[in-house]
Each structure stands twice: as C-alpha cells, then as structure tokens.
Amino acid sequence: MSEPAAPPPPNPTRAPGGATTDRRLLRGARTRRTIARHAADVASLEGLNGLSIGRLATDLGLSKSGVATLFGSKEKLQLAAVEAARDAFVDAVVRPVAGTPHGAARLRALLESWIGYATAPLFTGGCFWAANRPDFDSRPGPVHDALFGHHQEWLALLARELRHAVDTGEIAALDTDLAAFQIDAVLTAANIALRLGDTGAVDKARRVVEGLLTPPG
Amino acid sequence: MSEPAAPPPPNPTRAPGGATTDRRLLRGARTRRTIARHAADVASLEGLNGLSIGRLATDLGLSKSGVATLFGSKEKLQLAAVEAARDAFVDAVVRPVAGTPHGAARLRALLESWIGYATAPLFTGGCFWAANRPDFDSRPGPVHDALFGHHQEWLALLARELRHAVDTGEIAALDTDLAAFQIDAVLTAANIALRLGDTGAVDKARRVVEGLLTPPG
C-alpha cells in the first residue's frame, strides 16, 4: 500500500472560544481513532457485519450516543474500521521499510516485515482482510470499494518496486503486474497456512519471491 | 483433492424386518446429504458458526427433532457441511477431468475446471473455504482439522500430477510441493479477485500455471 492518507484535519471553528473547540475536535478525532482501531479488531474476529455502535460503546466504556455522533451510521463505522485496518497494516509492514533502497532490497524488506505481520497478527482475529473480503465480495458499495481499493494499492506498490528492480537491471525482465499478483498470492496463501498451523508455507513464499528476484543474465 | 471417500455404508440391522430398516436408513442417508449440502450453502454465506439445526429444519421444512437425530450436535452438522462442500468441489473440479491423462494435460484440465468452478460458484455465498477458514484458523478441533485436511489433499493432488509431469519428462524439473503451493495460491488469489470483480486475475493465474508447465530444455 502507498503512504497512508493523513487523517482529515480538524475543521477549526473561527469563532471566539475556538481553542476550546479545537481541543474538543482533536479529542474527538483521537477517540474516533481508538474506536475505529477497536472496530477493526472486532471485525477481524466477527466480521464487519458484526460491528455495532452499541457494542463498541459498551466495549470501550463510552456512551452510545457519543459513538453514534462520531460515526453516524453502521456503514461509516465499517468504513472507519477498514481505514484503521489499512493504517495498522501500513504502520506494521510498509512504514518500517521506507528507508530501504527501492527495488529488490525494498521487496525483500517488505517480504520480511509482511512475514512478521503474518506471524504475529495485528488484529485479534487474525487477518482482517481474509475475515472480511468474503463477506463483501458480492455486496457492492463503499465498504467493498474500500477493501478492493486497498488491495489494489498493495499490488501497485509491489509492482512499482518490481518495475524499479527491472529498470535498474537488478532483476531479469518480467511482467511486473503478474509478478505482483504472484507475490501477493503466495503471501496470502502463507498467511492462511500459518493460521492453520502449517509453518512451512512461509519458507515457500520466500522461495517464490526469491525466484522472481533473479538477477538478469 | 483425491477421490472422495464413499459415504459410510448404512449399518443394516440383521433382525427380521431388516429390509424396512435398510430403506429407512437409506432414506435417512439421503435426507442427511440434502441437509448437509444446504448447510454448506448456508455456511458459505454466513459461516459454519451461523449453522443451527433449527434454522436448517425451517429452511427445508423438516422437523427440528428429525434433523437433530440425523446430526446429533452442531459440531457434527458443521463437519457434515464441510464434507458436503468437499464432495461438491470434487464433483465439480476433480471428477470431470478423471479421464484426462496424468501430468501436464491433467493439470491444465484441473485448472480449467477450477476456473469454471470459481466463475460460477458452487455455493450460494461464493467460496465455502474462503468464508470459513478464517473463522476456524485459530479454533483447534475436528472442523479445523477437516478444513485443513481437505486443503492438504488438494495440494497433494496437484503435487502428484506435477511429479508425474516431471518424471515423464513433460515439464522441466521443479520442486513439486513448491509448485503446488504456487498453483493453489494463484487460484485462491484469482478467486478472491473474481469475487471483487477483477476478471483479469484468471488470466494471470493461467499464465503462472503455464509458466510452471514449461517443457524441459
């Protein structure tokens, strides 16, 4: 995935007493993030359809009306959970390797941070996306589009690094979109296998990725 | 997956009136299969945890006590749904290609029947396994073991055909377990992508499989 979008800036009120309003808005934004992150955990376990404003309020000791004010609707809550899951993924997998040179080195670093993420899942219920994609695949709408869009971002990030590696002559020419599809596929398969207790799949994923990063010649 | 196990033979009572008992048992076995197949559909949509004896009885116009007699417990009902899903998969994907010669030809035929299965899903809710693996990955028990075991059978079937293709010199030497892992991974990824409306992934899966079936030399 590419760099995460910054959280929307609070919209400061220009009226007198604006400082207080700003603080309240910032507090609201912070609470909103806490709730959204917890919602991602709940959804990783019970699915986005299992989310409810009442349940989150109870879990976090907040008032139901307060949570309702922050999110408005169940769909907005679901979308916030999807964004929180994406941000957690970016923080765990993408951000730590931002200092690694582009190309093969960055791809290997992404692979290792991804394996770390899969081995010690970020979310209570394991993979947020595996738990939720099947539920939304046949339900068009904003949640479907967000899940699909994040996956496309991740594929595009892999393809960009592959393209860089090809263009600089680090690796042999290949179809970068096809190779990104393969890398994502074996990582997903390794994740599923890990969850089922088959640890050998991680090594298989590494070997497939290494196979794609063969130097030219 | 390998050939499906035959359904367990009814255990005929040897007492007088055995013919009637047999018929009743057979009728029971048929009803059991109908219920199990419907349970697989429900589970593809709502997960195996969404199954209940009462709900299936209502859906199929049967008595709750009758369904309870046939399955006994929710876990047995879940296991029956998993077996029904596997049988449906074998009937749709594996059995139709049983006449194709082993090796590369059988693998290509499996690929095409698998794509047919993914394009027109067997189950109401799409992929039965994608819907249920995430729920059971962290819950040890017989349902987890059945889901895991069926996946291993499928990987073993792919590896056997690859081994045959290597041994007969049809394709270049490769690590058959690794290649089976890759084929399964890209098929799963293509299935997810198809569900999300990205039809190009099927062609990518075909290209990856063809890449693995390269003739020697």
Image (cartoon, coloured by chain):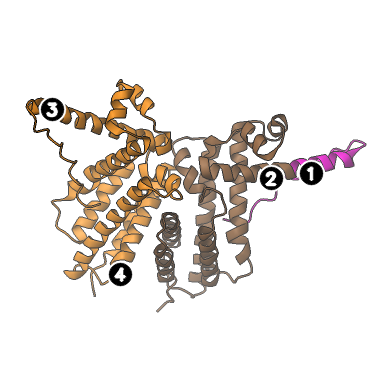
Chain colours: A brown, B orange
Q: Is residue A2 left or right of residue A177?
A: right
Q: Specify whether disc 2 shares its chain with disc 4.
A: no
* The C terminus of chain B: image quadrant: bottom left
Q: Residue at x 62, y 37 (%)?
A: A77
Reading the image, the residue beneath label 1 is A26
Would you call the spot at circle 1 few (<14 residues within 10 Å), some (14-19), or many (20 or more)?
some
User: Circle 2 sits in a helix, a strand or a loop, which is it?
Assistant: helix
Q: Is residue A96 left or right of residue B94?
A: right
The image quadrant that residue A52 belongs to is: top right
Residue A205 shown in magenta:
no
Is residue B169 visible to us here?
A: no
User: Circle 4 sits in a helix, a strand or a loop, which is it?
Assistant: loop
Q: Mark 2 — on which chain does it sit?
A: A
Give the vertical position of A1 relative to B41 (above or below): below
Would you call the spot at circle 2 few (<14 residues within 10 Å), some (14-19), or many (20 or more)?
some
Q: Are marks 4 and 3 in contact (CB under 8 Å)?
A: no
Reading the image, the residue beneath label 4 is B175
Q: Which residues are magenta?
A: A1-29
Q: Specify whether disc 4 shares its chain with disc 3.
A: yes
Would you call the spot at circle 3 few (<14 residues within 10 Å), some (14-19), or many (20 or more)?
some
Residue type pointed to by label 1? Leu
